[in-house]
Image (tube, rainbow, N blue to C red):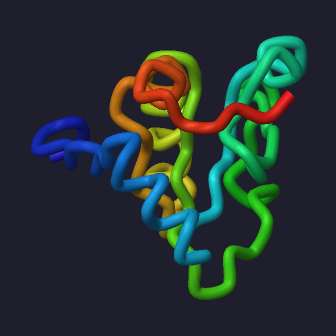
């Protein structure tokens, strides 16, 4: 039935994402607005704001895992919902969002 049994989003934590990035195995897509992104983001992240998010616009990741993020996890979850509707293979986001990344003392790009 439609709407029942909705699949939970896969989450990884900041340390897991840092390890994937170090190994070249992740592509981070930040769904915050451009001004938020400019204030600081995960190094190498691509900015595709939720306000105009289209799963088809996500760059081809090659063999990397696409990981969505926002500030705290709500908007990236909404973007994952859009990916599911579009039947995109994107199903993972950063638990706690960019805030968790920064709070873990990981590098921030501006």
- Tell me if residue 28 comes above or below residue 74 in the rendering: below
**Corner quadrant of residue 56:** bottom right
- Residue 53, percent across and down? 74, 37
Seen in the picture, residue 106 relative to 87 is either above or below; the reply is: above
Q: What is the number of callouts on the image?
A: 0
x and y percentages locating residue 65 in the rendered image: 51, 70
**Residue 85, percent from left and from top:** 49, 50
- Taking the spot 68% from the left edge, 75% from the top edge, the residue there is 61
In the rendered structure, the answer to whether residue 15 lies left or right of residue 61 reads left
- Pick the residue in front: 38 or 2: 38
Q: Is residue 75 visible?
A: no
Q: Residue at x 48, y 54 (%)?
A: 18
Residue drawn 40% across and 41% down?
Answer: 14
Q: Residue 64, how many percent across, how many down?
A: 57, 77
Residue extending furthest toward the bottom = 63
Left or right of 69: which side holds 97? Answer: left
* Res 89 visible: yes
Q: Vertically, is 6 above or below 99?
A: below
Name the residue located 55 percent from the left edge and 18 percent from the top edge.
71
Looking at the figure, which quarter contains the C terminus?
Answer: top right
């Amino acid at each position: 039935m439609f709407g029942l049994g909705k699949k939970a989003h896969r989450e990884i934590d900041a340390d897991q994402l840092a390890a994937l990035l170090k190994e070249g195995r992740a592509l981070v897509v930040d769904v915050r607005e451009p001004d938020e992104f400019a204030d600081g983001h995960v190094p190498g992240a691509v900015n595709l704001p939720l306000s105009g998010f289209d799963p088809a616009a996500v760059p081809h990741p090659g063999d990397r895992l696409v990981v969505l993020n926002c500030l705290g996890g709500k908007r990236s979850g909404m973007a994952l919902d859009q990916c599911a509707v579009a039947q995109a293979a994107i199903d993972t986001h950063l638990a706690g969002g960019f805030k968790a990344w920064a709070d873990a003392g990981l590098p921030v790009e501006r």
